[in-house]
């Protein structure tokens, strides 16, 4: 059990100008499940590896349970890591894979046996203990990698995209297993993924990164409902939020003659970013209305029937350019391709961003 | 009810028969070529083996005749009178120690050069590799003086050290490529599990490189077993004859007797030298194959 603190921790790879991780400031509570998420190259894996001790820290500090571990070797940090490709020892059996770290720590044979059996029970690996990794399926290998971390009883778990090598169905299943396992063990966990669905479903809190900078860290719900800037708004949620930069006019934002009403305060705040404003609304926060009610005319290009509801992709002419939109409808009102539908965003669900700084208004 | 698996519209697929026939012809040529090659390798071996039972007259007679009798005395003569038995043991002793030394030093050097970045890494690596370009003949005279000045002439220690030195370039070159192909994350996992650099090397990376290590071991064993020039130059002087290795002993059979050479004994000795290598190769054949390919493709 431990807290983890990144205190303005930076990493600059030799020979590069821009830091891979730029003054990361992040406090992780004891027992928390924190997810680091972002597109590839955003520095999330580097951040995790800095905490693991596999990557040098070029500035700032990293603390585990208040202890400065910035320049300690990995084995002095009392952490365990699950790798993306599992990184099992191919020449050792499942049992030996899990026992390796304990053996190096000179744990007694009886204690090793107890812990390995316990972890194997937890992960349903009992019958595979004598097998070599190559005789296991992908999901079993993943569980062995988890088991290797669990038997250590470390202060912090680090997981680097542990589900990305599994097929879709197994991924969803394992996702919930990891989450419940973490809840049961109560060990502070830092989890890296590029998949925003994993981030939303697993994390107590989610930290969104871009280009080495932390964008926002909050609960999944808060990230979804009040994204701090355009990047976070577009990254979280699938299909992504509709984000359009349009002209400001008296009374609101101008969508090709259709004015989305805004309050006086909102308009004033938006004016600081010039005469444009970035408007966002989620696909599900829309209503399809009749033509006479003044919705945005969208020509339907593609309808994704998801079974429970449907995503409708289309485009509308705004200021001479064709802009793409996504809206979610229930199945009873599925439009046909080529049809024009009229869409009205729900006024209380609109997100506004400064057109210049991209920050939330 | 049968499930309809037909696509909505029929598309004309290229006939598979033609391509299959082309593959067959190519494979046929390949196999014919391999068969000829195998014959070229195997025929002399069999001829040598058969000749080890022949008398001198039979050897210089028709090559296609079988030995008139199973003359095992060729073998016993070679083993005891020509001291091949003694030389055989000498060879085993020298090759065992030099191969062990080559593998230990070579594997450690290759591992560090392949997986740790430090200043001068490339220079050291290319120094090793440049050793591949040195023919034994070129360095033979200076090597002789170096070994003599060290007082190691006519000693196994000197010979073993020179064997190791000559085997290291290719060993390092081959194993460095092999160690590079091993997944980095496994090494990181072991580091996080608390393994020191030494333990990481001996308990995780070495076992993972097993097939490569076996391949290069066999390669070195064969190379050092067949070495003739180096022992000829370095094992000379007082009492050198007792220290000779197998190749020298065999050469001696053909040269010492002048025109009255014991050809049957010579072929028996040759067979004794060849057989252990064939046996080793046969035992480890699978590992050699996987070692040769896995380093190259992965």
Image (tube, grey):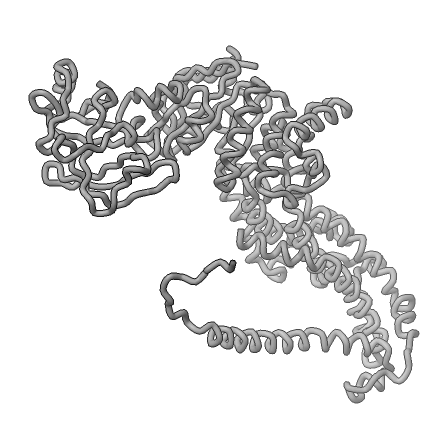
Q: Is residue A35 left or right of residue B164?
A: left
Residue at 55% x, 54% y is: B296
Total number of numbered discs in the rendering = 0
Residue at 33% x, 42% y is: A304
Instruction: From this view, report whether residue B249 is shown above or below residue A331.
Output: below
Instruction: From this view, report whether residue A66 is shown above or below residue B108.
Output: above
Q: Is residue B106 visible?
A: no
- Asked which quadrant contains residue A114, the reply is top right
Instruction: From this view, report whether residue B101 is shown above or below residue B118.
Output: below
The quarter of the picture where the C terminus of chain A appears is top left
Q: Is residue B192 visible?
A: yes
Of all residues, the one furthest to the top in this rendering is A66
Image location of residue A331, percent across then percent down: 32, 38
- Asked which quadrant contains residue A221, the reply is top left
Image location of residue A147, percent across then percent down: 63, 30
Of all residues, the one furthest to the bottom in this rendering is B62
Along the viewing direction, whichever of A178 and A45 lies nearer the viewer = A178
Along the viewing direction, whichever of A203 and B66 lies nearer the viewer = A203
- Asked which quadrant contains residue A74, the reply is top right
Residue at 38% x, 36% y is: A308
Residue at 68% x, 73% y is: B41
Along the viewing direction, whichever of B292 and B19 lies nearer the viewer = B19
Image location of residue A320, percent across then percent down: 10, 40
């Amino acid at each position: 059990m431990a807290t983890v603190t990144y205190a303005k921790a930076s990493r600059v790879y030799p020979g590069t100008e821009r830091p891979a991780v730029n003054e990361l400031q992040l406090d992780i509570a004891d027992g928390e499940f924190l997810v680091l998420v972002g597109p590839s190259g955003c520095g999330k894996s580097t951040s995790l590896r800095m905490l693991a001790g596999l990557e040098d820290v070029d500035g700032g500090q990293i603390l585990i349970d208040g202890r400065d571990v910035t320049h300690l070797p990995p084995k002095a940090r009392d952490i365990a890591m699950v790798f993306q490709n599992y990184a099992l020892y191919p020449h050792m059996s499942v049992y030996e894979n899990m026992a390796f770290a304990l053996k190096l720590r000179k744990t007694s044979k009886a204690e090793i046996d107890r812990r390995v059996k316990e972890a194997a029970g937890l992960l349903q690996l009992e019958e595979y203990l004598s097998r070599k990794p190559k005789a296991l399926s992908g999901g079993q290998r993943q569980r062995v990698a988890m088991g290797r971390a669990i038997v250590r009883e470390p202060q912090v778990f680090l997981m680097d995209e542990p589900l990305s090598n599994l097929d879709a169905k197994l991924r969803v299943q394992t996702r919930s297993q990891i989450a419940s396992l973490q809840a049961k063990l109560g060990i502070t966990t830092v989890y890296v993924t590029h998949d925003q669905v994993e981030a939303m479903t697993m994390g107590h809190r989610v930290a969104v990164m871009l280009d080495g900078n932390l964008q926002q860290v909050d609960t999944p719900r808060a990230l979804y409902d009040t994204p701090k800037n355009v990047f976070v708004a577009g990254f979280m949620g699938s299909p992504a939020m509709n984000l359009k930069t349009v002209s400001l006019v008296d009374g609101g934002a101008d969508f090709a003659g259709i004015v989305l009403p805004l309050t006086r305060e909102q308009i004033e705040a938006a004016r600081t970013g010039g005469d444009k404003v970035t408007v966002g609304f989620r696909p599900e926060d829309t209503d399809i209305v009749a033509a006479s009610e003044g919705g945005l005319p969208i020509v339907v290009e593609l309808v994704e029937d998801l079974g429970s509801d449907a995503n409708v992709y289309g485009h509308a002419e705004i200021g001479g350019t064709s802009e793409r939109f996504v809206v979610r409808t229930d199945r009873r009102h599925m439009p046909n391709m080529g049809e024009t539908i009229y869409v009205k965003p729900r006024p209380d669900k609109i997100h506004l961003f400064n057109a210049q700084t991209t920050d939330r208004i | 009810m049968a499930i309809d698996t037909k696509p909505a519209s029929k598309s004309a697929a290229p006939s598979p028969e033609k391509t299959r026939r082309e593959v067959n012809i190519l494979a046929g040529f390949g196999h014919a070529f391999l068969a000829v090659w195998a014959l070229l390798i195997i025929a002399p071996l069999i001829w040598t083996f058969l000749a080890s039972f022949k008398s001198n007259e039979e050897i210089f007679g028709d090559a296609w005749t079988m030995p008139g009798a199973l003359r095992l005395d060729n073998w016993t003569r070679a083993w005891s009178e020509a001291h091949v038995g003694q030389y055989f043991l000498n060879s085993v002793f020298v090759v065992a120690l030099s191969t062990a030394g080559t593998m230990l030093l070579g594997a450690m050097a290759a591992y560090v050069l392949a997986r740790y970045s430090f200043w001068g890494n490339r220079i050291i690596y290319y120094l090793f590799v440049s050793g591949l370009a040195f023919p034994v003949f070129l360095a033979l005279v200076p090597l002789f003086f170096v070994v003599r000045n060290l007082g190691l002439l006519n000693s196994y220690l000197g010979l073993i050290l020179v064997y190791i030195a000559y085997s290291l370039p290719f060993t390092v070159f081959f194993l460095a490529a092999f160690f590079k192909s091993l997944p980095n994350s496994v090494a990181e996992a072991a580091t996080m599990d608390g393994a020191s650099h030494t333990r990481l090397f001996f308990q995780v990376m070495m076992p993972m490189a097993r097939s490569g290590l076996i391949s290069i071991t066999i390669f070195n064993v064969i190379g050092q077993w067949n070495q003739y020039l180096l022992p000829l130059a370095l094992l000379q002087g007082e009492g050198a004859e007792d220290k000779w290795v197998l190749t020298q002993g065999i050469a001696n059979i053909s040269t010492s007797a002048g025109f009255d050479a014991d050809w049957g004994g010579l072929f028996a000795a040759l067979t004794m030298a060849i057989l252990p290598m064939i046996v080793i190769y046969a035992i480890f054949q699978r590992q050699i194959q996987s070692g040769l390919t896995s380093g190259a493709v992965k």
